[in-house]
Image (cartoon, helix red, strand yellow):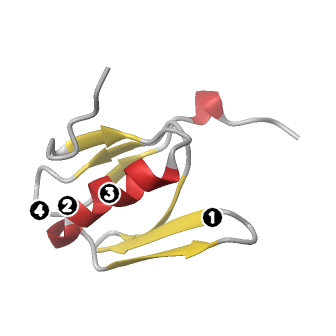
Amino acid sequence: MSKDFYADTYIVDDNLADTLHWLSLHQDSYDAFSYDAVTQELVVHHANGTDQIRVGDYLNARYGILITAHNFSTSSSS
């Protein structure tokens, strides 16, 4: 199944390049993002604060601001 990067919503998977591509097409919904290659942590800064983006997260740019919903069921426990 192909991804629609122009869609207002996106579910993050393990392909970082795809997530960065989607973010690049929705730059009006957030202020900045950063990626730490050592920890492999993607962080997005937006009007509601700062969110760490993880696999399984639901991203929504529909309302002009980035809304993130974390899918905690995909998180691994320690």
Mark positioned earlier in the residue sequence (2 or 4): 2
Q: Amino acid at mark 4?
A: Gly
User: In the image, residue 25 lies at what x, y percent?
Assistant: 19, 60
Mark positioned earlier in the residue sequence (2 or 1): 2
Residue at coordinates 30% horizontally, 41% vertically from top-left?
10
Residue at coordinates 19% horizontally, 53% vertically from top-left?
61
Q: 10 Å neighbourhood of mark 3: few (<14), some, or many (≥20)?
A: few
Q: Is residue 38 above or below residue 11?
A: below
Disc 2, SS? helix
Mark positioned earlier in the residue sequence (3 or 4): 3
Q: 10 Å neighbourhood of mark 4: few (<14), some, or many (≥20)?
A: some
- Quadrant where the C terminus sits is top right
Nearer to us of marks 1 and 3 is 3
Residue located beneath label 1 in the image: 41
How far apart, in angstroms, are the residues tagged by discs 2 and 3?
6 Å
Give 23 or 56, whichever is nearer the viewer. Answer: 23
Nearer to us of marks 2 and 4 is 2
Disc 3, SS? helix
How far apart, in angstroms, are the residues tagged by discs 2 and 4?
13 Å
Mark positioned earlier in the residue sequence (1 or 3): 3
Residue located beneath label 3 in the image: 21
CB-based contact (under 8 Å), mark 2 and mark 3: yes
Using the image, tell me which numbered label, if any, was put on residue 67. Answer: none
Q: Amino acid at mark 3?
A: His
Residue located beneath label 4 in the image: 64
User: In the image, residue 68 lies at what x, y percent?
Assistant: 37, 51
Residue located beneath label 2 in the image: 25
